[in-house]
Image: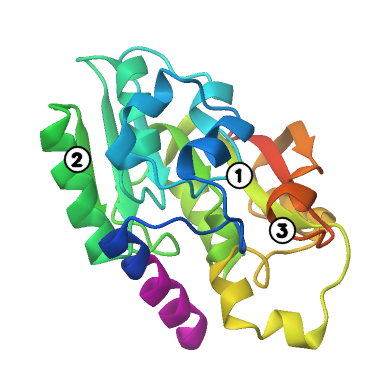
Amino acid sequence: MKDIKKIVKDHYSEVAAKSMNCCSCGSQKSANEISKSIGYSDADLELTDANLGLGCGNPVAMGNIKSGDTVLDLGSGAGFDCFLASKKVGNKGKVIGVDFSPQMVKKARENAKKYKINNVEFKFGDIENLPIDDSSIDVVISNCVINLAPDKKKVFSEIQRVLKPGGKSYVSDIVLLGSLSKEQKSDASLIAGCVAGALLKEEYLAIIESVGLTTRILSEDVEISKKQYHGIPLESLKVEINKK
């Protein structure tokens, strides 16, 4: 697990330093092209420095985020989804981003200052052990990040812990539709590229349910495999997760 986390951390720290694209598994498309293809609007993309083209969906758009909500973004990167959520929660709300790359946290804080967004906070932390109080979050969002965590059950247990009763989580993530080879599972580029650590869709959903959360599939993007992942049997799963 430590090796997996080191591979992921080193890779995304490099992404933050170079503001390059990844999580597109070799795609040569620009960050804006990738983001448009997964559900972001031209208005969203005005946050140029925060958009690194790393996602596989738009959890802010599919989430029911209201004015005054406290929103938590798991794997917040350069702050892109946090800044979009900040518009929805307004001055009475708050958005917290957690990332385990110090370089990403630094970049996100710099972007918040640049865009003069005051209702966001970025914290250094591991999504398997969130630096967040129990039952303090209205909405959790995450965009193509949980697949990178070695212990996904721990991540969903943490989501269950931090959500308020009745709270919701909106997750866009890569899940497998077929098995990977042993070589693919140990390929560092696929580990960092959101593929090698992904679970089969049925296993992914079962883990969420096993920690006491309920799920509702919002949509499934199979075409993303051809567009960004060289035809590997996978999809982008968009799911609403509910805490009773």
Q: Amino acid at mark 3?
A: Tyr
Query: Which one is earlier in the sequence, the residue at label 3 or at label 2?
Result: 2
Please give the name of the residue rendered at 84% of the width and 60% of the height, measured from the top-left corner.
233
Task: Give the SS element for disc 2.
Answer: helix
- The disc at residue 56 is 1
Q: Residue at x 75, y 87 (%)?
A: 183
> How far apart are the alpha carbons under marks 1 and 3?
11 Å
Label 2, residues with CA under 10 Å away: few <14, some 14-19, many ≥20: many
**Quick check: 149 left or right of 110?**
right
Quarter of the image with the C terminus is top right
Q: How many marks?
A: 3
Q: Quadrant of residue 180?
A: bottom right
Residue assigned mark 2 = 111
The residue stretch that appears in magenta: 1-12
Tell me residue 213's x, y (percent): 64, 43
* Foreground residue among 157 and 35: 35
